[in-house]
Image (cartoon, rainbow, N blue to C red):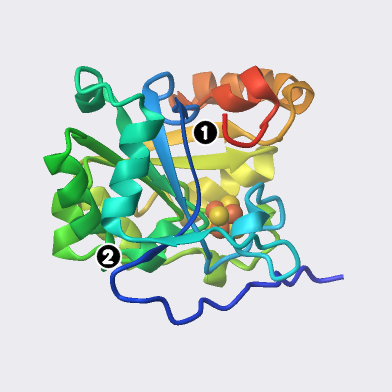
Amino acid sequence: MKYVPKLKEMPEIPADKLPVSEMFYSIQGEGRFAGCPALFIRLKYCNLGCSWCDTRFTWDSDKIEAGELLTNYEITEKAIKLTGKRNDIMPSIHVVITGGEPMLHQLKIPKLISIMKKNGFAIFEIETNGMYVPTDEMKEAISWWNCSPKLTNNGLDKRVNIVPEALRVISDTKRADFKFVVRNSEDITELENDYMKYIPKENIMLMPEGWTVRKQKESMPWVMKICREKGLRFSPRLHILSWNNARGK
Ligand code: SF4
């Protein structure tokens, strides 16, 4: 049967607030900055609804959690509290704005970043599916685009998954990686046919699928082998290897 995601429609949100699903202080598990201390700000709602998504609590009509509507100051205050009010370490912490799909809120994010910068945070990564063309303000505000475009292994049609113009603009920032969840050779062919015309090879990373330690350990050797053969980068999933994808870690 055809997979149809149950996307919760985004309601009207007050102009001075963002819908925050959760915030926590941990270690970035994926992408170029895997291993860096990171404060995660997870925003609600998504436009896509991948079949294997592990954050359905941000977008799935049946599973969505209430979260909180917070102002930029409330988010900043919480971020300071979570990092132990340590002015000495705040500048080196990666603030990871994630989701759901955080670009749904891109008109509000630059203001949040500017307030957090005044309070000692300096590095702002965004984790996005790469389907929204960033505004000039976003391009300026974001330090690194940790972009994860989706292959059809997410259960959706390629016409739904790919927005070439968004990929081009994000890639043109020269501050972007594009991570793909892959599980077999068809995924690699799809990536080569459908995405490599928009993204330079040196910015592509392959990431093994799977939300358990067991699954990661099974998938990693094959993905590493492909990375070796194709000259592509490998992205780990340290949070899964360390905590089996437990929430808030
Ligand atoms: S785009 Fe990201 S948050 Fe949205 S459904 Fe897919 S994996 Fe989940």
Which quadrant would the C terminus be assigned to in this image?
Answer: top right
Residue located beneath label 1 in the image: 206
Give the number of callouts. 2
Above or below, comparing residue 5 to residue 99 in the picture: below
Examine the rendering and report whether any part of residue 97 can be seen: yes
Is the residue indicated by label 2 positioned so its CB lies within 8 Å of ligand 1?
Answer: no
* Left or right, residue 81 beside residue 27: left
Specify few, some or many for label 2: CA neighbours under 10 Å numbering under 14, 14-19, or 20 or more: some
Q: Position of residue 84 (x, y in %)?
A: 35, 24
Where disc 2 sits, the SS reads loop
Label 2 and label 1: CA atoms lie apart by 31 Å
Q: Position of residue 184 (x, y in %)?
A: 70, 38
- Residue visible at 63% across and 45% down in the picture: 187
Q: Amino acid at mark 2?
A: Lys
Q: Amino acid at mark 1?
A: Leu
Quarter occupied by residue 65: bottom right
